Amino acid sequence: MAADGRATEIVVIGGGTAGVRLAQRLAASAAEPAPGPGPATAVTLLGEEPHAPYNRVLLGEVLAGRYGPDVISLPPAPGTVRRGVRAVRIDRAQRLVRCDDGSVVPYDRLVLATGSNPVLPALRGLRRSEQGGLPAGVHSFRTMDDCLALSAAVRPGTRAVVIGGGLLGVSAARALAERGAQVVLAQQGEYLMERQLDRTGSLLLRRHLESWGVEVHTECRVRGLVLDDAGEGDPGSDPGPGPGWLAAVELADGFRLDAELTVLACGVRPRTGLARDAGLDVRRGIVVDDELRTSDPYIHAIGDCAEHADRLYGLAGAAIEQADALARSLTAGRAEDRAARYTGTRALTRLTLAALGGPTPQVPPTERPSGPLDLAAFGETTPLPGDDVVQLTDATRGAYRKVVVRGDRLVGGVLLGDLTTIGALARTWEDDEPLPPTTPLLHLLTPDGGF
């Protein structure tokens, strides 16, 4: 509660997972019995997208046609929720947020949950000066609008090129294959999902994608986009008048991949412009301390846009943990301050690629995988000298498990195709407790007696 007895005005900029979770946790705290009349906090959430808040992790399922947009909606955020409103300026002196519709929102505490934007690589033909946007047929894959536009564009037999073989690129390629597109996945790195998987796990993932009809190219650098009205101008030059429909994707070696649509899945970058313009400390992300405060003590940041202890997470699990920690911090008494601090997230990545169904002429039904592909990765999957590594592989079932042990601690692991041990492994890793000295390391992977 504010010093004058009124409810503390907490304004949250961002209607994604982090912002909605924070509003929910603050509402839960306000519902608990508290001394004094009236609510302790009043929350206003400003969401730039017109859609109801949704689970961004499941956009691939919407693109695949498995879920409708409403299915992935998050539980409604309590308090005042304004959709389709973009914050354009923070007035720190007056503690006001100015919005693109001309409205002004006062705050006692401001929370930036602005998320991240897709990275647009420096490709010839990507930008058009007279349009200021992407050429027709070229899509990013980050928002519900991106997903709906892609869904409207794809048809059985559509030639699609996905640029980027990380988590997002793999999900997009898999979803487009589900819709019957002829998909090529171009990954500049040495193997797929190199941030999460090791080489063996990546090779198994590649085999699964290829068995679903996705053509995978690694160590493959894309040089530019060939538009139907474009010449061979310099990179970044205006390709000329007209809509500039995509015709092909040009690789660094000059080879061209015919394409009717291209998905840019080249990573994300924290949205920090609002914070930077307000004079807050920004490095790669908006710098926050253990109470998730920025360089202005009345402004906090959580989720993809926040940089804590020199680390950006970009994962839903971290966004949720930060929202919970900030809710505790904003509502804690002095005796609870230490418990409210955020000390970091031990991030685990999980992905389920469901079994193919629907119109997929490029993969005959008899040649399709019989079931979904599940994978999980956590911690350090590449061992250092002196580390112990335990691996189990079943090529027939496409199953792979690996853990990395450093001293008496589990420091990382990869599981693909069989996640029966992930619960126990994740708890052991998250607790960071010494492993029992009498337990053989192989038992970390075989609680069920092995494959």
Image (tube, rainbow, N blue to C red):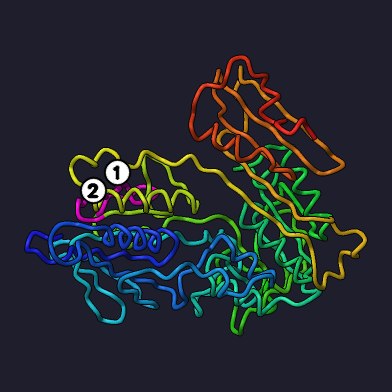
Point out which mark residue 340 bears.
1
Q: Is residue 104 above or below residue 398?
A: below
Total numbered badges shown on the rendered structure:
2
Residue situated furthest left in the rendering:
4
Q: CA distance from mark 1 to mark 2?
A: 7 Å
Point out which mark residue 332 bears.
2
- Judged left or right of residue 92, residue 402 is right
Residues rendered magenta in the picture? 280-299
Where's the C terminus, which quadrant?
top right
Please state which of residues 231 and 164 is positioned toward the viewer in this rendering. Answer: 164
Residue 215: percent from the left, percent from the top? 80, 57
Instruction: Give the amino acid at mark 2.
Output: Ala
Residue visible at 76% across and 61% down?
Answer: 184
- Judged left or right of residue 82, residue 352 is right
Point out which mark residue 150 bears.
none
Sort mark 1 into few (<14), some (14-19) or many (20+) by Cα contacts within 10 Å. many
Residue visible at 75% across and 71% down?
Answer: 179
Residue situated furthest front in the rendering:
33
Instruction: Give the amino acid at mark 1.
Output: Ala
Residue 235: percent from the left, percent from the top? 58, 63
Q: Label 2's element?
A: loop
Q: Is residue 239 visible?
A: no
Discs 1, 2 touching: Cβ within 8 Å: yes
Based on the displayed image, in which of its 4 quarters is residue 171 positioned? bottom right
Q: Label 1's element?
A: loop
Please state which of residues 206 and 31 is positioned toward the viewer in this rendering. Answer: 31
